[in-house]
Image (cartoon, rainbow, N blue to C red):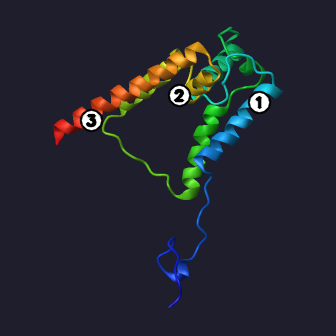
């Protein structure tokens, strides 16, 4: 009998296991790249602008509107130098990765309007609190007051949401 490994069901289906980057290592690499980008390109405040999809979407839309209609909507300093294509890049990259790995599938929703409105609210709240959770943590790491307040608020929101979900699900059982 031929030996099998834990990744295959039969000896003829042998394949190499996929090696993924450890999350902590990705964080170290991404943080280093973001800091280098800030230093090399002299990115001024808002600090930690490196990966914030709500802000990048706002700057992409504002840049297009400014260019097409001659308006002067606010954009971040870095968005005045280069066009922010991270939002469409993330969407296209995720779509391509899902297609390549065979994980792409349509998932019908029974409440599409509700999910759209929740997503819209998340983006608006992201803009109001100056960005996504990643940016909040980075700003808090800089010691910025608003970053620290937002981080505390985020933790309290997670705590309250978790308690409410547990209460809701415990009543259903």
**Which residue is labeled 3 in the image?**
166
Q: Answer left or right for 71 relative to 165.
A: right
The residue wearing badge 2 is: 133
Identify which residue, 143 or 88, lies in the foreground: 143
Contact check, label 1 and label 2, Cβ < 8 Å: no
Within 10 Å of disc 3 (Cα), the crowding (few <14, some 14-19, many 20+) is few
Q: Nearest to the eye among marks 3 and 1: give it.
A: 3
Q: Secondary structure at mark 3?
A: helix
- In the depicted view, which residue is nearer to us: 86 or 173? 173
Image position of 8 with respect to 23: above or below: below
Image quarter of residue 57:
top right
Q: Secondary structure at mark 2?
A: helix
In the rendered image, residue 127, in percent from the top left (x then y), is placed at 54, 18
Furthest-right residue in view?
A: 40
Q: Earlier in the sequence, mark 2 or mark 3?
A: 2
Q: Earlier in the sequence, mark 3 or mark 1?
A: 1
Name the residue that disc number 1 marks.
Answer: 37
Nearest the eye: 16 or 122: 16
Badge 2 density bin: few <14, some 14–19, many ≥20, Cα 10 Å = some
Residue lying at 73% horizontally and 36% vertically, measured from the top left: 32
Tag 3 and tag 1, C-beta contact below 8 Å: no
Q: Is residue 7 shown above or below 56?
A: below
Q: Position of residue 121 (x, y in %)?
A: 43, 22
Residue located 36% across and 34% down the image: 112
Q: Few, some or many C-alpha atoms within 10 Å of disc 1 (few <14, some 14-19, many ≥20)?
A: few
> Which residue is at a point 62% across and 34% down the rendered structure image?
88
Q: Position of residue 170 (x, y in %)?
A: 20, 38
Q: Identify the residue at horizontal 83%, vertical 28% (top origin).
A: 40
């Amino acid at each position: 009998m031929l030996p099998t490994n834990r990744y295959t069901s039969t000896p003829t289906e042998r394949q190499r296991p996929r090696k993924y980057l450890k999350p902590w290592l990705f964080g170290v690499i991404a943080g280093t790249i973001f800091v280098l980008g800030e230093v090399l390109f002299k990115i001024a405040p808002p600090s930690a602008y490196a990966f914030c999809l709500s802000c990048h979407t706002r700057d992409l839309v504002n840049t297009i509107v400014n260019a097409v209609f001659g308006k002067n909507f606010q954009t971040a300093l870095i968005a005045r130098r280069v066009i922010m294509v991270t939002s469409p890049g993330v969407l296209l990259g995720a779509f391509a990765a899902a297609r390549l790995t065979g994980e792409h599938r349509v998932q019908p929703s029974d409440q599409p309007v509700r999910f759209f409105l929740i997503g819209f609210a998340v983006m608006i709240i992201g803009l109001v609190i100056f960005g996504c959770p990643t940016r909040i943590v980075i700003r808090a790491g800089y010691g910025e007051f608003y970053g620290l307040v937002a981080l505390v608020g985020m933790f309290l929101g997670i705590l309250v949401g978790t308690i409410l979900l547990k209460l809701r699900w415990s009543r259903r059982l």
